[in-house]
Image (tube, rainbow, N blue to C red):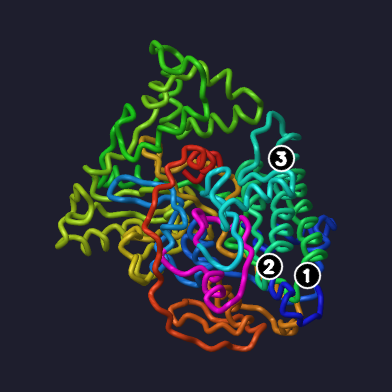
Amino acid sequence: MGDSTDEDDLRLLVIGLDAGCRPILEPLFEADEIPTLERLFETGTSGPLESQIPPWTASAWPSMYTGKNPGKHGVYDFLSFDGYDWDVVNSTHVRERPVWELLSEHGLSSVVVNLPVTHPPREFDGALIPGLTAPEDPPCHPEGILEDVKMACGDYHVYPQSTDTPKESIEGYERTIECRGAAFRYLCRRIDPEFGFLQFQLTDSVFHERPGDKEAIEAVYSAVDEQVAETIEETDPENVLIVSDHGMGTVTGHEFRVNEFLREQGRLEAKSGGEGMPDWSTSWQNDLLEGESAGEHEEGVLEKAMNVAAKFGVTTQRVANTLDTVGLKEPIGKRVPNEMIRAASEQVDFPESEAYVRSKSELGIRINLEGREPNGQVPESEYENVRDELIEQLSNVRTPDREPVFDEVAPRETYFDGPHVEKAPDIVTVPAAFDNAISADVGVDQFGEPMEPWNHKRTGIVAAAGSDFDESVALGGATIFDVAPTICTLFDVPIDTEMDGTTLPVVDDGTEATYPDYEADPISATDDRAVEDRLSDLGYL
């Protein structure tokens, strides 16, 4: 990193490692797989970075880049709900000011590449290519810049392209990561920004798609390290900040099917035959098992077997993922018709239920409140009683090993505050050490093996290296809400008094200011099946 104070230099480079954490990085350090990242950690200062609740990508990155909790920015999950209908979240659902727009208002330019939930981009001084929840070939800022990137860098994809073999899958990861770095460097040459934010999503995705696959994990991180090295060499940033939105680790406990629990408590109704809500519980599944003759069938042995399997939680997603691994997805798919998929599972009847899990990534329960939900079943006068009863009941749930399922079950106000708290689940459920998992399944046993052997943990990482950072200061107690205030302070931009974090102690405390209300764009639909399929493949839906 350079020591120049030239105003044209990249003053701060932020590297986002989705799901990065010490338990993942340390073995890679020891194996000398990621020497550039290791050097940054060793020469600078580092520590844990506590995520929010829920510690999931689509909500956590907006919390980081706005410095505000979901109650203020409005995004709790990969999905946004309007009554019982849903859509995949995008940048219009984020109702607070991203830090690069705040910098732009103070005359500072930025290049932002691959950050989740940044599609569609707004105007600011700089350039942006959006990340997860954006469609392929998304609109970028400035308009038309993606075509220039593709011409200059050869190609660019938001998501890795489909492959037929594990070897090709790894090569696809490497190509995608290489394009991230090349695009960022091209935009830096073109924009000459003061601030850069380069995010790598595959450091998370590889654990969902290739859980425990040492070769794939090492390949992803090695490719990221190479891009970080090339980016530092070319952009010569004065300071580098490494951040993650959450951690990652094995899930060795139990999966708790909360909706099945609620049904057994008499609070939830279910439907079968594909008539339940929301329709994502069935609509995407046969796409994972797609086949030419999937529309016609006669009930037979295979369908009966699917029904039995569904009772034990062997869902079509699990089947699809397993078949895909051995290269059998398509031929099996041609023998598994749509009607069979729907008949083999039950869905929550949201309008007729008192309470339910809408989406497992929300980590909570929504009460079907009269006057708020379209067909609310719980009178407003009973809301607090119902919520208190559910909190007590869920707090007392034990696993088959007689251990608590949850570290905490609490009212949403415990974790969220702001004008958009009403969008949150009414009850927040925090799995014990995130070694248990919850699901929205119904029609299966209350407990089972976790669908995903690896999943998110709450503790990520932060590291700071550079001439403007006090590298002798130990970083402890940092949260993802501290990142945006730290960026502001480094650039001498007043911190928004509404931010929930504080400046990390590696730089002196900055000043604060009250900013005008953020004029967010009207909420627009994502409505992109490819995005939904990608989230399904990763296990988020």
Query: Which amino acid type corresponds to the residue marked 1 in the rendered image?
Result: Leu
Q: Quadrant of residue 428?
A: bottom left
Q: Can I make out residue 447 in this image?
A: yes
Circle 2 residues within 10 Å: few <14, some 14–19, many ≥20: many
- SS at mark 1 in the image: helix
Secondary structure at badge 2 equals: strand
Q: Is residue 312 above or below residue 120?
A: above
**Which structural element holds mark 3?**
helix
Is 381 situated above or below 80?
Answer: below
Residue drawn at the location 56% of the way across and 75% of the way down: 103
Residue 325, image x and y in percent? 65, 31
Name the quarter where the N terminus is drawn: bottom right
Q: Give the extent of the magenta segment.
A: 95-122
Name which residue type carries label 2. Answer: Ile
Answer with left or right where residue 392 lies relative to residue 405: left
Q: Position of residue 457 (x, y in %)?
A: 57, 59
Q: Please give the residue where the numbered disc 3 appears in the rendered image.
A: 172
- Comes first in the chain, label 1 or label 2: 1
State the residue position of label 2.
242
Q: Are marks 1 and 2 in contact (CB under 8 Å)?
A: yes
Q: Earlier in the sequence, mark 2 or mark 3?
A: 3
Q: Provide the residue designation for mark 1.
A: 40
Camera-nearest label, 1 or 3: 3
- Is residue 447 within the magenta segment? no
> Which amino acid, by three-letter code, is at mark 3?
Gly
Given contact means CB atoms under 8 Å apart, are the residues at marks 2 and 3 in contact?
A: no
